Amino acid sequence: LNNGLALTPPMGWLSWERFRCNTDCEKDPDNCISEKLFRQMADHMEADGYKDVGYEYINIDDCWMAKERDEKGRLQADPKRFPNGIKKLADYVHNKGLKLGIYEDFGTKTCGGYPGSEFFLNIDAQSFAEWEIDLLKLDGCNADTSDMSTGYPLMGFFLNLTGRPFLYSCSWPAYVSKPNYTAIAKSCNIWRNYKDVQDSWDSVAGIIKFYGDNKQKFADVAGPGHFNDPDMLIVGDFGLSEDQQRVQMGMWAIMTAPLIMSVDLRNVKPFAKELLTNRRVIAVNQDPMGIQGKRIWQVENVDYWMKEIQPTGSYAFAFVNFNTNGVPQKLNFTLKYLQFTDPAGYNITETFTGKFLGIYKITALFSTSVNPTGIFMATAVPLSVYGR
Ligand SMILES: OC[C@@H]1[C@H](O)[C@H](O)[C@@H](O)CN1C(=S)Nc1ccc(F)cc1
């Protein structure tokens, strides 16, 4: 969507994967979907260095609403869980230099059963503008999918009509069988096109496979202002090993995906915090060209991916080992086989550590080893960039 937003993949936090639809603030006051939770996440985004490396949006997902609209048909936050209302929460978040996102659904009800937006698009857009919201995630549960090609652009129109800029996140392609990505990219800044991420390696591996298969060539549609969204980062949660967390962080960088954490920022393990704020990995994700990386080949359950980055002729590249045979996989390839072409050679640096690995001619053999369900990731900058 050409609204000046999401020129690089948005970065932030979203409640859903880690906090779901927990509305029991009596029994579980620290983890229920409430204004307190989002204020605490905003506090940690700022205080713990996430904002410093680019994380910007605090996003409310499903289950924030009261069960009924008010007498004027307007949405209202659950009065017990959001006693001060959404506008006050937006003020709080804005005072920290962050932005606030909210959730609705193009359907009669949200996935969680709360009031849907389908027949209230304009009035809801107006509410979100009054509340000074900065991002809308519009989900697609409980809707006639044949209405979506009208409904999603129409909500974009109403958001635009308010005069307030909104980063528009659409779940539209995740709900239709043959998405028209050109139409979607015209109306949306980011769009979910696959299953919800769950807190497991299988879920993350499945999403990487879907993106590697790249059916209907959705990778080619990505660019500044319009990105494919493979769903939230679950780095720091419960289901992934350290290697697997590195896989998700590295691959979301190569896939040029929104970096939207869903983790309890009040207690993130040092390893996960390091990874989530790794400036070299974030730089690959935030490369100004906004090109989405692609899977180049698969050999014995190892994926090889590469993403064009600046300076011109440079690449971020990765090997992901999907084997679970418990043995680190040794890999030996010429850079030629990795599709590097500059005869002057390349400066190769490992991404997670920043370790300089050497200067390689394209006929040279590049050797590394990748742990099971692990990743090797590096950047290759052609020597010609240094004027040699
Ligand atoms: O309720 C909202 C929740 C989150 O927003 C996800 O990111 C969205 O993809 C949708 N969503 C859920 S659980 N959707 C859903 C997932 C499974 C299902 F059988 C019916 C609906």
Image (cartoon, rainbow, N blue to C red):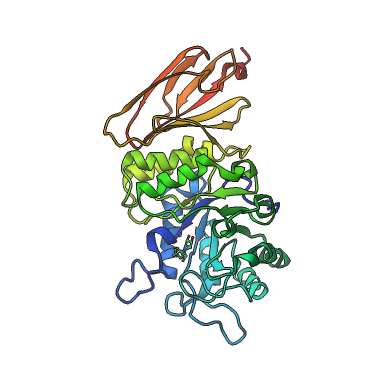
Q: Please identify the residue farthest to the bottom as the structure is shown.
A: 71
Q: Please identify the residue farthest to the left as the structure is shown.
A: 326
Would you place residue 310 above or below residue 198 in this image?
above
Q: Please identify the residue farthest to the front as the structure is shown.
A: 177
Quarter assignment of residue 164: bottom right
- At horizontal 40% and vertical 41% (from top left) the residue drawn is 275
- In x, y percent, where is residue 142? 53, 71
> Along the horizontal axis of the image, is 295 left or right of 44?
right
Would you place residue 27 above or below residue 288 in this image?
below
- In x, y percent, where is residue 24? 35, 74
Quarter assignment of residue 308: top right
Would you place residue 86 above or below residue 334 in this image?
below
Near-viewer residue (341 or 97): 341
- In x, y percent, where is residue 286? 56, 40
Q: Please count the marks in the image.
A: 0
Near-viewer residue (167 or 207): 207
Residue 278 visible, this angle = no
In the rendered image, the quadrant that contains the C terminus is top right
Near-viewer residue (188 or 204): 204
- At horizontal 58% and vertical 32% (from top left) the residue drawn is 309
- At horizontal 48% and vertical 34% (from top left) the residue drawn is 280
Near-viewer residue (350 or 318): 318
- At horizontal 65% and vertical 48% (from top left) the residue drawn is 225
- In x, y percent, where is residue 302? 41, 31
Residue 355 visible, this angle = yes
Would you place residue 310 above or below residue 53 in this image?
above
